Amino acid sequence: MKKIPQRTCMGCNEKKDKNQLIRIIKNKDNEIHVDKTGKMEGRGAYICNDVKCLEKVIKSKRLEKVLETNISNEIYESLRGVILGK
């Protein structure tokens, strides 16, 4: 039986299976992307598939601290779209 990796959500700080979370990455060119496959290269951060966790991350600017860069509203809106299934 294969062990499923665990990751911590930046919003609620709960450990969950990696495949239940959404990955946000910063690549070598300092570009921020929402990684739907979980296989893109770069520094990754994870968030639950929940708008409440996203709001906590936006309010605390935790994603900016973790990825050490400014995050535009476009990234947050695309993340909101992924969470809401748009």
Image (cartoon, rainbow, N blue to C red):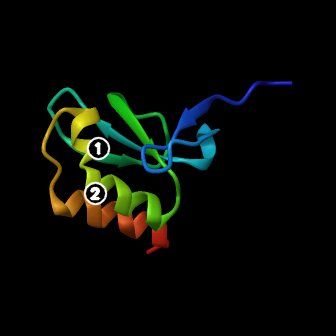
Q: In which quarter of the image is residue 17?
A: top right
Reading the image, the residue beneath label 1 is: 63
Residue topped by disc 2 = 58
Is residue 36 depicted above or below 16 in this figure?
below
Mark 2: which secondary structure? helix
Q: Where is residue 52 in the image (x, y as percent from the top left)?
A: 45, 65
Query: Could you tell which of marks 2 and 1 lies nearer the N-terminus?
Result: 2
Label 2: how many Cα within 10 Å (few below 14, some 14–19, many 20+): some
Q: Do the residues labelled 2 and 1 touch (CB within 8 Å)?
A: yes
Give coordinates of residue 47: x percent, y percent. 46, 48
- The type of residue carrying mark 1 is Leu
Q: Residue at x 36, y 28 (%)?
A: 41
Left or right of 61 in this view: 45: right
Q: Can you say whether 64 is above or below 57 in the image?
A: above
In the depicted view, which residue is nearer to us: 10 or 80? Answer: 10
Q: Nearer the viewer, residue 12 or 74?
A: 12
Q: On residue 82, which mark appears? A: none
Q: Tell me the distance, in whole angstroms, between the alpha carbons under discs 2 and 1.
A: 7 Å
At label 2, the amino acid type is Ile
Q: Where is residue 68 in the image (x, y as percent from the top left)?
A: 18, 32
- In-image side of 36 versus 29 (left or right): right
Query: Within 10 angstroms of label 1, few (less than 14), some, or many (20 or more) residues?
Result: many
